[in-house]
Structures are given as C-alpha cells and as structure tokens.
Image (tube, helix red, strand yellow):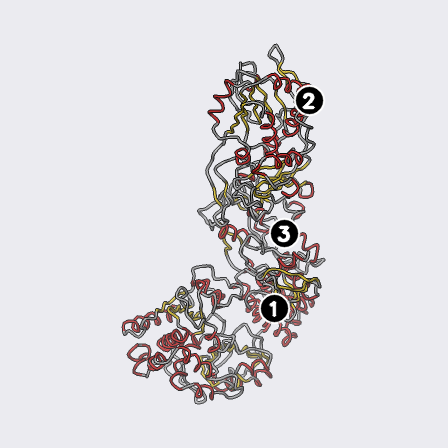
Amino acid sequence: MGFPHNPHARETVLLSQYFGDPEARSYKGWVKRGGYEALQQALAMPPAAVTDVVKESGLRGRGGAGFPTGLKWTFMPKEKDKKKPHYLCVNADESEPGTFKDREIMRWTPHALLEGTLITMHAIQADVAYIYIRGEFTEPFAVMEQALAEATAAKALGTFKIYLHKGAGAYICGEETALMSSIEGKRGNPRIKPPFPAAFGVFGMPTTINNVETLAVVPHIITHGAAWHKAMSLSSPKSTGTKLFSVCGHIQKPGNYEVTMGFPLKDLVYELAGGMRPGRTLKACIPGGSSVPILNREETERCLLDYEGCVAEGTLLGSGGVIVFDDSADMVYQIMRLARFYAHESCAQCTQCREGTAWTTKILERVLAGQGKMQDLDLLLDLAENMTGKTICVLSDSCAAPVVSGIKKFRGEFEDYIAGRRRAMVA
Amino acid sequence: MPDPNGLVNLTIDGAPVSVPKGTLVIEAAKQAGILVPHYCYHPGLPVAGVCRMCLVEIEKAPKLQIACATPVTDGMVVHTQSRQARDGRMGVLELLLINHPLDCPICDQAGECELQDFTFQEGRPATRYSPAYAKRFNPVEDFGPDVLFVPNRCILCTRCVRFMEDVAQEPVLNVSERGDRAYIGIHPDARLDHPWAGNVVDLCPVGSLLSKDFLHKARAWELDKTASICTGCSQGCNITLDTRDDVVVRIRPRPNLAVNRYFICDHGRMNYRWMNRGDRSEAPLVRQPDGTARAVDWDEALERAAAILRGAGGAAVALISPRVSTEALFLARELLASFEWTGAYQLVMGEEAPLAGVPDLALRAERAPNARGADLLGYGPDYAAALRAAEQAAVVLVLDDPQAAVRPAGALIYLGTVPPEDGSDPGADGTLRSAELVLPIANVAEEEGTFVNRDGRVQRYVQAKPAPGMAQPAWWVLGALGARLGRGTAPASAAEVFDRLAASVPAFAGLSYANLGLGGRVIGADAGVPA
C-alpha cells in the first residue's frame, strides 16, 4: 500500500488532509478529527435546507460531467411517495483511466465518504444507499467494509441503510445508468434517458447518483457554509471548491494533488508534480481522464483547471485524471492504446460504439504496423464524427475525442508511420 | 396548442400528423406513410434504443434523436430525410456491415432482409473497411428444435433476447461478451424450446436466426403470401400462408393486436404439412349397387345426394369437424333443417401453452379453430351421443371428419378433404368408407371463409392455392345441393353465404363479410350483446 506524498505548499488540503494518516480510518479517529459533526448539524436541518446550502455552494459533480450537485438533488420528488423509496447511489467505480482520487478517499478517509453519504441521504430523503465500488478496488473495499461496520456499531447510521456493492470490473459500470443496471443484478448496460434516475432510477425508484469525491466534500460545506465553499475559486466563479487531480504518466512525482478550482495546469505539472524527467520536455497532456481531448504543450501551459478553463482549451475537466506525456511518447501508440481500451470496454449495445471503437483500433494498429494509408486519417476522423453524439452513453464519444484531437495535434506522427519514416511496430 | 381531442400535432417531413400523447416518433411517422429504417425497434417488444438506426433530425434538438425512443411533443418538427439524418443512418449501416459476412446469395433471409433493404435504400455504395481486417467469426449454433443461430450475420439488435425475456418470460438468451466480440448467447443448460420460441426467427431482422423447417426451402421472392387464420387451436391467430408454386412452405404470424399481436406459437407454425397432402379426395365418389365406388362428375353426385335427402325423413345427424368454415357449418344446418337433426363435433384436446407476456394469448387446449362457430350454429360437443343417434338416423352427414366411426341405418354422405380414414375395409358394412357419397372438398388453404375464435371473433381466411382435382369448397357443395332441393339459389361466394348467415342467425346480426375486414369482428360487440 502506497503512502501519499506530503502536501505541497500550494495545495489546498481539504479532502486529502488525512491521506496517509492511518488513525483517521477508524471511527474513533475520525470523530476525534471532527468527523460526523457535520452529520449532526445536517440532521438538525430540514432536508431542503441541506440541499439549498449545497446548491448555494456551487459544488459540481466531481465524477466528470460537472453537473451542479444541489440542483441534481432538487430533481428528486419533494413529496415522498410511500410506495417509492428514494435511493442514493454512490459512484465509486472510478474506472476512468488516469483517475485514482476516489480510491484514495476510500482508502484513507472512508468515514468522510460515509458522512457525506448520510448527509446526502438526509437531503434527498433516501432510505437506502448503495456504494458501488469498482471490482478491482479490493483494498478500498476492505477499508470501506470496516468503516461501515464501525459506523454501524457506533449507531452513526440511524435509520439509514448503506450497502457496499462490488462491481465486477467493467469500465461502463461507472456510467450512472449502467451502474444502476449492475446494482439491480443485470448486465451493466447503460439505459436510455429519459426517464432520468431522479424519476426512474435503481429498481425503478427515484434515485440520485453522486461521485465519491462530490459526497466527501459535502460535510465540509455543511460545516463551513456555502459562502466559504463558493469563495474557493481562482478563476471562473462557476467552478468552486477544491479538486483532487490524479497526476500520472511521464512525471517526476505522480500522485493525487488537491488544488483550488482554477489552478493552472502548468503549475500542477511542473511544480506540484515535480515536472518532467531530466532532459525531457512536455509534449502533451490529458487533463480529465482518458475520455477528454488531448492538449498539446502550449494548451497545457495555458489551461486553468476548472470546468470553464478546460472548455476554453477545447477539452474537459472530466474526472481530474491528468495524464502527462513527455517528448519520448509515441502519440500514435498512445492513442491506439486508448482506442483499444474503449473497444474492449464497449458494452456492445449501440452500433457506432460496438463496431466503431473496434474499427478505429484496427486502423490505428495498421498505421502503427506501417501499413496505413493517408486516407486512413480522414477515415478515422469521419468514423469519429459518426461515433459522436449518436449513442446512449458517451463511451463512443470518449473513444472519438482523443483520436480527433490526437490526429489534429500530432498529425505528423501519424504521417511518419504511414510514409515509413518511423519504424513500424506490431502493437 | 393543445388539441381538443387530446392529440399531439407535429410535422414529419413536411406532413402534419396528429397522434395520441405518448406516441413514439417512429410510430407517428408510420401515420404519415414514412418508414424510418430501424432494427432493434419492434412494436411488440420493449424499446431498447440500441441499433441507433432510426436517427432522425428534430428541430431544436442539439443532436440527432432516435425515433424509436422519442415521444412526440406538440409542434415538433421532424426531418427523416435531412442530410444529417441520412448521414447518421448511413454511418450505422456501414458499421453494421463491417463484421457482416455479406453472404446474401446463400442466406435464407435474402429478399426479406432488413439489412439488405435499408442498405439498398440508404447505405454506402462501397465499404471503407479494408479487406485486410478480419471479420468477427463464430460458428453456427443449434439453439433449439427449430432455431438455428448464424452469429456472423447477427447485428445484435437484441430483439430475440427481449422476446425471450419480456414476452416469453423465459430468459434463456442474452448478449454475451462485450464490444465487437459480443454475440447472442444461450444459457448453457437451456434450449430454445419454449412453445413460442419460433417467433425469434420472424423477429430477427437479418438471417441470423433461421427456421430449420424452412431452411433452403425457397427464396423469399418466390413466395406468394396469403392472409389466413391458424387452424391449430381456438385462439384464431392471424397468419400468412407462404406458398411456392402452390405448395405451402411456411406459416408466419400476421399482426392482429386484438388476437395474437405479432406472434404465433410453434404448434401453429408447423401446422401446415397436411395442407399439401397428396392423397386427397379428388373426385366425387358414388356408391354403386355392387358396393363399389365410382367417380362421377359433380352434377351426378349432387343429383344423387339431392335424391337421398328428398327421399328421407325423420332424424338426421351431422358429424362435423370443428375445422370447417362457419359457412359450411351454416349450410349443412340449413340442409338438414327439414329433419329432426342433431349435430356434434369431436374436439381434440392438448396442453395449453400461454405466451406469458401477452394477455389472453395461448396455444389453447381446444385444438381446432371453429368450435365456437359450431356452438353458435347449434352443433354440440356431445359427439358420443351423436354417434349413437347416427345409428338410427335416416341421413348422416359427415363433414370433414374422416375418422368418424359411424354405422348408420340410413344414408351416409361424407364431405371430406381427405379420403375416409376410419381404418376398416372399403367393403365393410356401414362405415365411412361405404358412404353413399364421398364428396371432395377444399381445405383451409384452398378456399375462403371464416372461423369464429374462442372469444367470438369472426375472422376471414383467404384462398392460397387451388384445390386438387374436382374438390370444391364445402360451402359450394352444400349450397349447390340446397339449390337442387329448391332452397333458393346456389350461393356464388363464401361472402354470400356469410351474409345469408348473418341475416338469419341472431348471434351474427350486424356482421357482414365485407365489414369483417382482415382483422375480424367480435359477434355481438356492436349490438352491445355480450360475446
């Protein structure tokens, strides 16, 4: 089990304050650190008031889509139908390549998640919560199990019920409707929306689905107030609070870094994460997990890490999985690996995704093998167009995004393979 | 603006359409005469929205929408033929074909394949998929008694999976694996042997699920299709008889939302070989004084029959098959009206096999299509009593009941599609084989007429092929005989017989052959009389 680094001076440690502190994992240790006070505070408030505070705080979903959290909660029925219990699903499937922040929250501060979960359950009047934990997360699962047992023994749950649900290791189960299908015991396939989860969610009941990091922030917002959270913003006022960024790739100090929204990506990469390896320079960066468009060096150095800042550079903040490539990276190979991942993980429902991801991979493999043709690049772009915005979920779009941005920004590397200027490889 | 009739008004390809609230765009388009190409959507199955073929452009929507999962809204403007929509669908077709074997010349589905049809209609003229790339391969699998699975042709529309799961409610099929490795899987311990499993073959839009029974029998374009009614049980499922060169080669369901929706059971589906039997009664046979039977023309045969009926009096018995038309049952009863007559049928019973997901749809225990019609016309189920009564009767009329073991004291007239099957020697005394007259009649595929199903729905069936030899529809024979006995003119058509029936039998009041249409009508429904 790896231990996290000591916080950098420019980090704003909120969620990551107790990363590496084994005592914080226990119920007693968490209470000693002020844990579960926010819960008591929230339980004393009417549910709508809790929602209002979160709405006012400007908190947006940390899973990738960045949807305003408080607003999402208001979609739940106000008047609870006795025959329709409300559910909260906690998305702890964290399967986006390059992202490993939820894992650390669960590993080190399981009670932060439980507390956030309980407050949210109160706000949306949920009776039951499912924490859907990625199958590969054996250690976080064990930590969560222990924490839940301790919290239950300490009667911290009250009448709320929380179940830990272990996924079987499918990327697509991180998609909210697929996650619900999986909880229901079905094949983890995304479902058509509408109906939206707030009306027809897990088991057909009103359901809210939130990411681990989103919920872990909630107790802090209750404790410190909406204004405090709203004030944490370095750039766009529409992006507030802190965000955990998982930095990996060609970087000196990979790991999770918590910074205030609007922090420059350049500083995160060069300063906090220790910069490039000696003698290497930055070539590209994926700022929000494998599904978002790739940034080149100039864009990376300009990009501000919040929802708006990423959009301004033509990419997305996503889940905050920062993948760094230095000048030794073979972008054609990297993009093929991403496409291959999506081809492997496509749930096979939608035609564009099932066939398109696989075809894209075959073309890229052929280019790498030195047998590509120049028209393959146009074909890839046309395929990507066909795979974007036409399917049930965005897995297909996620495969297309790095391909399009990769060809646009690193076309020369593709052409080198096709023209035989680069040694072919069998990938 | 909300419509006073609760209808939603929208525009599809420039045509105004008004449909009930909740209607899906794909169904609304049908109202405007527009078929939006689709694969996974089927009106008899839950919406899946996975093939993405029915992409259409809807004004004010940020991206293309699937017509099969988008409900109409007031003022919606839909374009099915815009550049964007056509490009979207062309993209789907190209992707569906990259792993497809393109083996149309040897595929049973060719000619009635939706992948072929829509590709011709709006697909790309050539593929961009390099021939160097491998196509997905999985070997052919035997799914069940009549279903063969050819995975390479599958486009994973999941209609079969949803049929078994939601309609048959025996979920033995699934989508196995992910990505482009996905295929339709069957539970390792299960067979696709549900009594309604054959519907997956009809539902499959491509040649992936095939009927073993129909395999390589005919090409789709060689088939003539005729609307008919299944004779397998009293449900009265609407079917299409597919004939090739006047041979029935396949039965498929014909949609009727009030009866069988889009489905038929396997019992009904396989219930056609007898329609092609070669050993039929082909000429009227008249018993000679020496006991032998002589083939005669209809004029002589009818004259002989008329003479028998004219000369007889007292009791008459009709032993009928509940598989003959309402028209024949009506005319037989008219013919015997001057006698003290009784009529009965023998009903073969079997096991009931419901289709769980559709209310009131089952393979019924009563394995005949017209017992209800017989009941309404005064025939009864007490066959044994009728057999006993027949022994004393002056006249016994056997209507397509070739196994009737009857020993009448009086005259015996047998109208049958097939020769007597009572098993005794031709010369044996007093059996069906020694009938005064054996009159050849057409079977259900060879005539038109009506059946009344168990719910009192009167439904028409249409002639699919010619009758063999001199065989004639039973209504023609009985009608001509009636005319010879001076009971009005001989009817010229089944329609005429039915209209006479509707005019004289109160249960059928208000119905006419024309207004039955092809969907049929329930007796008494219009008059408010419980059916």
Q: Are marks 1 and 3 in contact (CB under 8 Å)?
A: no
| Quadrant housing residue B21 | bottom right
Q: Which residue is mark 1?
A: A388
Pointer 2 residue: B298
Q: Is residue B345 left or right of residue B281?
A: left
Give me the residue at 54% from left, 81% from top.
Answer: A307
Observer able to see residue A154: yes
- Where does residue B156 sit, x and y in percent of width and height? 56, 55
Disc 3: CA contacts within 10 A as few (<14), some (14-19) or many (>=20): some
Quickly name the residue at label 3.
B101
Could you give the CA–CA distance between mark 2 and mark 1, rounded to whole angstroms? 73 Å
Mark 3 — on which chain does it sit?
B
The residues tagged by marks 1 and 3 sit, at their Cα atoms, a distance apart of 26 Å
Q: Residue type at mark 2?
A: Trp
In this view, B172 is above or below A45: above
Above or below, B86 against A327 in this view is above
Callout 1: residue from which chain?
A
Please report, as a chain letter, where disc 2 is located.
B
Residue type (three-letter) at the residue carrying disc 3: Pro
